[in-house]
Image (cartoon, coloured by chain):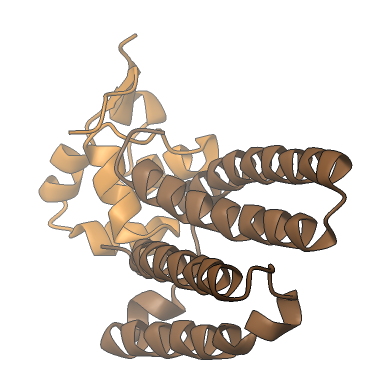
Chain colours: A brown, B orange
Amino acid sequence: MAFQEKSAWIMSVTFLVGILSYFSAVASITQDTGVMPHPAEVSFGIYGYILFIIICHIVIASLAPKDADTPTDERERKIFDRASHISADVLGIGVFLALGFYFFNKDGNILFYGVFFSFLFCQLVEHIAQIVLYRRAI
Amino acid sequence: MPKKLPITNRVRELRERHSMTQGDLGDAIGVTRQTVAAIEQGAYSPSLESAFRIARVFKVGIEEVFEWDG
């Protein structure tokens, strides 16, 4: 398996866990307090999450240093371009929905969480699309 | 099993005839071993530049390596 594909697997799993953890925390606080928390109040996990992703990449790079040093080739660039295109569509739809929701509810926190979720979800979709494209004809 | 593209090739046959590994061929034409494997399986059609590089490595014409089979 190519280093970039391993990286896509790690990013997919960590993004999925990250999204579920983050929004579970937001939902839990909202349920306890009856008010949606300000985004700054639930930023604590993000730093640990970023550190975890960096550590994962260092581990897979140290297991196969030659693969990690290999620059992306033409097929991988094509895969990344297509995955990025799909991801951009998902982000656009998510932001559009978040803006629409804000338009009717006038709640800035929901707008923030909507856009933030769209950003995280589009990254997840991008990595999943990379994995799928690595395994099929392009 | 990835779907097949309309271009067939003899890369595996020529590579084995030249006693090269997928990694050797990948290094020679500037792609990864995984991309050479995808080309051999018919799951990826290389760029024109890479196709010419492959033919040049095997010292044959490009039409002896790749064929349209659509």
Depth order, front residue of A64/A15: A15
Check the image and report above or below for A25 versus B52: below
Q: Position of residue A85 (x, y in %)?
A: 63, 41
Residue at 12% x, 57% y: name it.
B19
Q: Answer left or right for A82 relative to A118.
A: left
Q: Quadrant of the N terminus of chain A?
A: bottom left
Q: Position of residue A14 (x, y in %)?
A: 41, 71
Q: Position of residue A67 (x, y in %)?
A: 35, 75
Check the image and report above or below for A24 versus B65: below
Check the image and report above or below for B58 versus A116: above
Q: How many marks?
A: 0
Depth order, front residue of A95/B40: A95
Residue at 75% x, 46% y: name it.
A98
Residue at 31% x, 36% y: name it.
A136
Q: Quadrant of the C terminus of chain A?
A: top left
Depth order, front residue of A35/B41: A35
Q: Answer left or right for B32 relative to A125.
A: left
Examine the image and state in which quarter residue A42 appears.
bottom right
Depth order, front residue of B15/A30: A30
Q: Answer left or right for A55 relative to A41.
A: left
Q: Position of residue B47 (x, y in %)?
A: 51, 38
